[in-house]
Image (cartoon, rainbow, N blue to C red):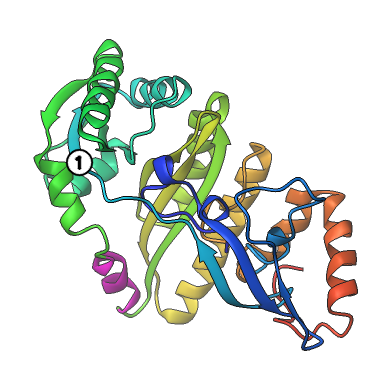
Amino acid sequence: TRASGQFSSRWGSIEDLCISVTAILPDGGTVTTPNTPRAAVGPDIRHLFIGAEGMMGVITEACLKIFPLPELRLFECIRFANLQAGIESMRQFMQRGLRPFLVRLYDAEEAQYAMGDDTVSDPVLFVGCEGIRAVATAEMVAVVDICMKNGGEMLGPTPVKSWMDKRFDFSAVEKILNSAGGVAETIEVASFWRDVETTYQCVKKAVAPHVDKVLGHFSHAYPQGTSIYLILFGKAEDDAAAEQQILKIWDSAMQAALNCDAAISHHHGIGYVRRQFVAPYLGPAIGLLRNIKKSIDPNSTMNPGKWL
């Protein structure tokens, strides 16, 4: 699915971490991509399989990068008076070559959940730096300095450490989905820095009529932009109505993302709900992908009905 982990701002996404793959093709043949640090030998064949969601073959082996465990991990929580100041801080430290392993800017609504405090009314940034002690320390000093110059206020590391302990807890969403008529979803898109706030506002406005609550944060940051992640909670009359509500949410969110020239998926992939938006997002390139798929899998054996 071309996924990204929570620490991708420093360590990269799957296309950065995966050096080579072995895959079984639709005709039963096997292909193994070259296992070298880097090569300039035509297009990178790995990318026929990374993100293809099983449409081009079945990956049976992968060679992945590993890294030394960090000597030191440092955390800080920083409060901003408004979202613009937080986004600008992220842009500045990413474009200046700093690479915190943890970068999560919460809007005022999600900040209450992230902080575990319903009195919180401002956006907060969770940031973490790790690696060689001297380098991690210097990096955190530089990140905090940029945030302070943009009006940030240091709140200390405790909220971030608490989040680290429960960062895989998805029970809030699961609880709603397990209730009759429960509506809950997560949607992530991505934009260049110049469009981040506009895209966030447009997608949030598009989905708001279909749910009771919309939470948002910005993570997976790059020198050129960042992902925008929305969490939605709502309630419908019954499960059938909830399903229709979810489909309306996805249609509204994806159309808003397309209108903003945003990536319609940052790291969750395509699946079924995004299928009809792949062609308008890719434009004429969708024809090239269809030709490649037809060449590799003329009988559409592999995962039929997915993103093409």
Residue 53 on image: x %, y %:
63, 71
Residue 140 image-quadrant placement: top left
Q: Residue at coordinates 57% horizontally, 36% vertically from top-left?
A: 191
Residue 94 image-quadrant placement: top left
Quick one: which residue is furthest to the front in this view? 36
Quick one: which residue is furthest to the top in this view? 149
Apparent side of residue 229 relative to residue 51 in the rendered image (left or right): left
Q: Residue at coordinates 86% horizontally, 66% vertically from top-left?
A: 292
Q: Residue at coordinates 14% horizontally, 47% vertically from top-left?
A: 161
Q: Assign a secondary structure to mark 1.
A: strand
User: Which region is colored magenta?
Assistant: 170-178
Q: Is residue 101 magenta?
A: no
Residue 297 on image: x %, y %:
84, 79
Q: Residue at coordinates 35% horizontally, 74% vertically from top-left?
A: 177
Name the image quarter holding the C terminus.
Answer: bottom right
- Is disc 1 surrounded by few (<14), some (14 to 19) or many (20+) residues within 10 Å? some
Q: Kindly identify which residue carries mark 1.
A: 73
Name the image quarter holding the N terminus.
Answer: bottom right
Apparent side of residue 66 relative to residue 267 in the rendered image (left or right): left
Residue 215 on image: x %, y %:
34, 47
Q: For the stretch drawn in magenta, what is the main secondary structure?
A: helix
Q: Is residue 174 magenta?
A: yes
Apparent side of residue 222 relative to residue 67 in the rendered image (left or right): right
Looking at the image, is 180 positioned above or below residue 261?
below
So how many labels did they put on this image? 1
Residue 125 image-quadrant placement: top left
Q: Amino acid at mark 1?
A: Arg
Looking at the image, is 133 positioned above or below residue 97?
below
Residue 243 on image: x %, y %:
50, 74
Q: Nearer the viewer, residue 205 or 226?
A: 226
User: Does the image show residue 270?
Assistant: no
Looking at the image, is 170 positioned above or below residue 115?
below
